[in-house]
Amino acid sequence: MRVYTVLMAAFLGMGSMAAAQTDTLPKTGRKSCSCAFSSINQGGVMQGEAGAYFQFQTINGLRYKSWFAGLGVGLDLYPVDGLPVFLDLRKYILDRQYSPFVYADVGIHFADKNNEETMWQRIEYSNGLYYDVGVGVKIGFMKKAGLLLSGGYSFKKYERKESYRQLDCNFFPCNAGSQRYRYSLSRLSLKLGVQF
């Protein structure tokens, strides 16, 4: 019992001594992330085998030092209207107002809004892969804002299915036949935009 009392007193004594000590190290402020919200809005043209078509994109994300990552959505009219939804990653080579950069976008091209149905035919579009890679230059006009000029290679993929109705059929899906067309479209892309 005596050993138990001595151990208990020693334990309580050490606890009170530890509580009585003060922190002698200087308190440093916790460093915060140097991240900042950034928005890129750009429009331009795409040129490919089917001709020249308009495009528009808006990308919102975070800028960290010379890196930017964000989610984007666009309007892609080449040659079937679509809405690409993608992840954008870009690296500014210099940490200055005028800086070259490289970028890569990858996502899904939504083409199914173009589906059509007539009395004799049904046309269905499937969604597919979308990506865009390239280089550009940022010309700063404020501390973190700038004008962007970029050029690159863009790719989208989709499928078109045409189904034909039999003459004695009143409702789909009694098909007389169907055909599938798979499209893989490569384009050159030129964009002009602003980043805030």
Image (spheres, rainbow, N blue to C red):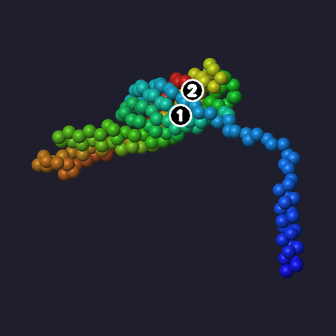
Q: Which residue is situated farthest in the bottom direction here? A: 1
- Which image quadrant: the C terminus? top right
> Which residue is found at the position 85% from the left and 75% from the top?
5
Q: Residues within 10 Å of mark 2 (few under 14, many from 20)?
A: some
Q: Nearer the viewer, residue 160 or 11?
A: 11
Q: Residues within 10 Å of mark 1 (few under 14, many from 20)?
A: many
Q: Nearer the viewer, residue 62 or 109?
A: 62
Q: Amino acid at mark 2?
A: Gln
> Which residue is found at the position 21% from the left and 42% from the top?
121
Decide if residue 156 is on the left or right side of residue 161.
right
Snapshot quadrant of residue 89: top right
Mark 1 lies on residue? 60
Q: Nearer the viewer, residue 164 or 124?
A: 124
Mark 2 lies on residue? 195
> Which residue is found at the position 52% from the left and 23% from the top?
192
On the image, the x and y values in percent for residue 143 come to 65, 23
Snapshot quadrant of residue 31: top right
Count how many numbered circles sit on residues in the image: 2
Answer yes or no: is residue 47 visible: no
Snapshot quadrant of residue 93: top right
Q: Secondary structure at mark 2?
A: strand
> Which residue is found at the position 41% from the left and 26% from the top?
53
Decide if residue 83 is on the left or right side of residue 69.
left
Q: Which residue is situated farthest in the top direction here? A: 141
CB-based contact (under 8 Å), mark 2 and mark 1: no
Answer yes or no: is residue 4 visible: yes
Q: Secondary structure at mark 1?
A: strand
Reading the chain from its start, which is encountered first: label 2 or label 1? Answer: 1
On the image, the x and y values in percent for residue 90 come to 60, 35
